[in-house]
Image: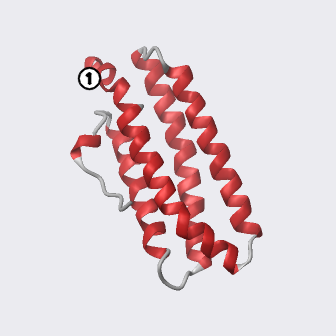
């Protein structure tokens, strides 16, 4: 899945939308690394930035949901916790792996994360878009 930002993904909060755009850029970087020779150091740095940004983003998003009174924030938070655990496991596996293992991770990871992120924005984050709009 090739990932790219478009306006149908706008939630309406500047910082949340900026995070989503940057996360997509990082995932696109992983996607483009997969077919060719892999620079394991560069990919590791991209993964680390993505993991850091994702954790910070989830904190911002959960605070926004609290501020706008989004009723399903607990279920939304659970999906965040699950992804953070998955990212931690991927990072550990990548750090411990040989080049062949790392290449395999990279080949599947970009598409997997792209699918998750777009699905999460469309199916979960859009649920609180109207609450953000009401906040004005």
Residue under circle 1?
Answer: 133
User: Circle 1 sits in a helix, a strand or a loop, which is it?
Assistant: helix
Does residue 70 lie above or below 108 as drawn?
A: above
Residue at point 40%, 55% (across, down): 24
Snapshot quadrant of residue 134: top left
Give the farthest residue toward the right.
96
Residue at point 62%, 36% (across, down): 81
Say which of 65 and 86 sits in front. 86
Q: Quadrant of the N terminus?
A: bottom left
135 relative position to 53: left or right: left
Q: Quadrant of the C terminus?
A: top left
* Percent coordinates x, y for residue 135 in the rendering: 30, 19
Snapshot quadrant of residue 125: top left
Give the farthest residue toward the left.
7
Does residue 71 lie above or below 126 as drawn?
A: above
3 relative position to 27: left or right: left
Give the farthest residue toward the bottom.
37
* Percent coordinates x, y for residue 129 in the rendering: 31, 27
Residue at point 32%, 24% (across, down): 132
Residue at point 68%, 79% (across, down): 100
Does residue 31 lie above or below 13 as drawn?
A: below
Q: Residues within 10 Å of mark 1 (few under 14, many from 20)?
A: few
* Percent coordinates x, y for residue 119 in the rendering: 41, 42
């Amino acid at each position: 899945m090739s990932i790219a930002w478009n306006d149908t993904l706008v939630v309406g909060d500047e910082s949340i939308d900026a995070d989503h755009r940057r996360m997509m850029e990082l995932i696109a970087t992983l996607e483009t690394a997969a077919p060719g020779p892999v620079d394991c150091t560069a990919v590791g740095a991209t993964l680390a930035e993505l993991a850091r940004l994702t954790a910070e983003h989830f904190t911002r998003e959960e605070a926004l949901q609290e501020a706008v009174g989004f009723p399903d924030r607990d279920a939304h938070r659970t999906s965040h916790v699950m992804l953070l655990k998955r990212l931690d496991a991927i990072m550990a596996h990548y750090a411990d792996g040989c080049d062949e293992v790392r290449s395999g991770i990279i080949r599947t990871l970009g598409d997997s994360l792209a699918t998750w992120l777009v699905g999460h924005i469309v199916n979960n984050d859009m649920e609180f878009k109207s609450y953000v709009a009401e906040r004005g």
